[in-house]
Image: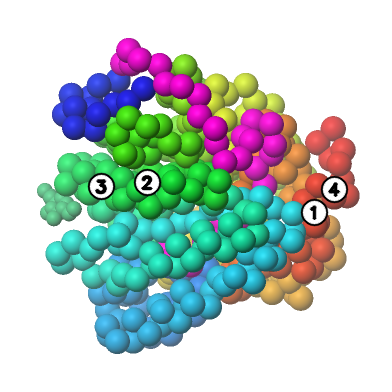
Amino acid sequence: MHLPTLFSTAFAVVTCVIADNPISPGFPYGSTKVRGVNLGGWLVLEPWITPSIFDNTGDSRVVDEWTYGQYVASATATSVLTNHWNTWITQSDFAAIAAAGLNHVRIPIGYWAFQVGPGEPYHTGQLPYLQKAVSWAGTYGLKVIVDLHGAPGSQNGFDNSGQRLSYPGWHSNNTNIQRTDTIIKQIASLFTGNPNVVAMISPLNEPAGFDGSAVLTPLKQFYYDSYGNVRYPNGPTESNTVLLLHDAFQPLSYWSGYQIPPNWQGVAMDTHIYQVFSNSDVAMSQAQHISTACSYGSSLSGFDLWLVVGEWSPAATDCAKYLNGRGIGARYDGSYSGSPKVGSCTGLTGAASSFSSSYKTFLRQYWEAQVIAFERGAQGWIQWDWKNENADEWSYQAGLANGWIPSPPTALKYPTICG
Ligand SMILES: *[C@@H]1O[C@H](CO)[C@@H](O)[C@H](O)[C@H]1NC(C)=O
């Protein structure tokens, strides 16, 4: 059904009277598993993915893309960013991703690629690269998920939203939300005519549902409005583009019954699963990481929408430099404030050439356990990330080159690791 944005925004319309027709997605979700990688740190900077871009500023105030724009001289920033966009991901990456047997890429992009408001220090120019990426994906038969990773005001305060903040500013400001609606319409108008390549649009990455109803109430309305914007980009004709909603860090049960057929069509849920962002997570043994991974095979199953694990990683520590933010340490080695030391990070992050063979065996087992579980319990998985400068435990590319990720991804060495 179509929720006219005008009315839904004003009156929070959540009931449906007319059921939509089923759509024909560009990928057989539900019968063929999603296997993909995130092209993180390309069109949205992340300090831990390209630490050199941040270190080269010589300015410790530069902790995200906002402060990059704020504190780096404009001509320098323009040249560094343009070079980064031209070189970090190229057509040959799409060829390699397809050759590795993957079928999806998820591409994060920030709102500032579409519009920069007064007083916002962002540099723009990313959008032509997204369009090039879509054309390369088409060439190699890959499906694209366009993922709005940063919204005005920041939807989560994470540096990867563009702006690191102690409390996010998106949800409490209607101007921010309306600007995001406009950008989703713009993304839809660019790509819903090409659902065989851009099979999914994800209107907001990782909104801060952990901040409670202050976030979740406007978020649910924004998701309804996004349905209209993506499903009906040009009035009455339905698009075939799937709407992929992040779960906002809520349990799947929270979303039970939300935007389900028959009234809603072509909606999928995105959940992100990491075992590195709490003291108890990084304290787990390797065997515990693997058994926790396996447990998702049952705990994710039975959800009423297509479910994709849109971010996860074979990393079992938070040792990667700047992973928790530039200037912030790691829980694992106790350099993060308030975290007891578990062990040394030496040999657990950095270049694969420093990894022991037993560590590489663990990475392969843990990778396979997650793939098995996410294909059992969900419609598939998209690893974070394809490449980064110096944290090979996170890199799909490094995993392929160093033997802990098989090609194709179905060539498992430990197919019974989860029983
Ligand atoms: C709301 O956000 C806009 C930018 O999207 C900003 O210009 C405005 O000042 C914000 N309003 C408040 C009350 O913070």
Task: Judge whether 51 appears above or below 266 on screen.
Answer: below
Q: Which residues are magenta?
A: 15-44
Q: Of the residues shown, which amino acid type is indicated by label 4?
A: Leu
Give the dominant element type of the magenta stretch: helix, strand or loop: loop
In the shown orientation, is residue 409 left or right of residue 117? Answer: right
Of label 1 and label 3, which has the lower sequence position? 3
> Is label 3 in contact with label 2 (beta carbons under 8 Å)?
no
Foreground mark, 4 or 3, reads 3
Q: Which colour scheme appears in the figure?
A: rainbow
Residue 256 x, y percent position in the rendering? 48, 20
Residue 287 lies, in percent from the top left, at: 77, 45
Residue underneath mark 4: 412
The front one of 347 and 302 is 302
Query: Which quadrant of the figure contains the N terminus?
Result: top left
Compared to residue 141, the image places residue 174 above or below, namely above
Q: In the image, what residue occupies the spot 47% across and 26% down?
A: 265
| Mark toward the start of the polypeptide (4 vs 2) | 2
Q: Amino acid at mark 3?
A: Thr
**Callout 4: 10 Å neighbours few (<14), some, many (20+)?**
some
Taking the image as shown, residue 308 lies to the left or right of residue 357, namely: left
Check disc 1 and give the amino acid type.
Pro
Few, some or many C-alpha atoms within 10 Å of disc 3 (few <14, some 14-19, many ≥20)? some
The label on residue 408 is 1
- In 3D space, how far apart are the residues under numbered discs 3 and 2 (Cα atoms)? 10 Å
The numbered mark, 1 or 2, whose residue comes first in the sequence reads: 2
Disc 1 versus disc 4: distance between alpha carbons? 9 Å
Residue in front for this viewpoint, 1 or 235? 235
CB of mark 3 near ligand 1 (< 8 Å): no
Residue under pointer 2: 188
Q: Which residue is mark 3?
A: 182
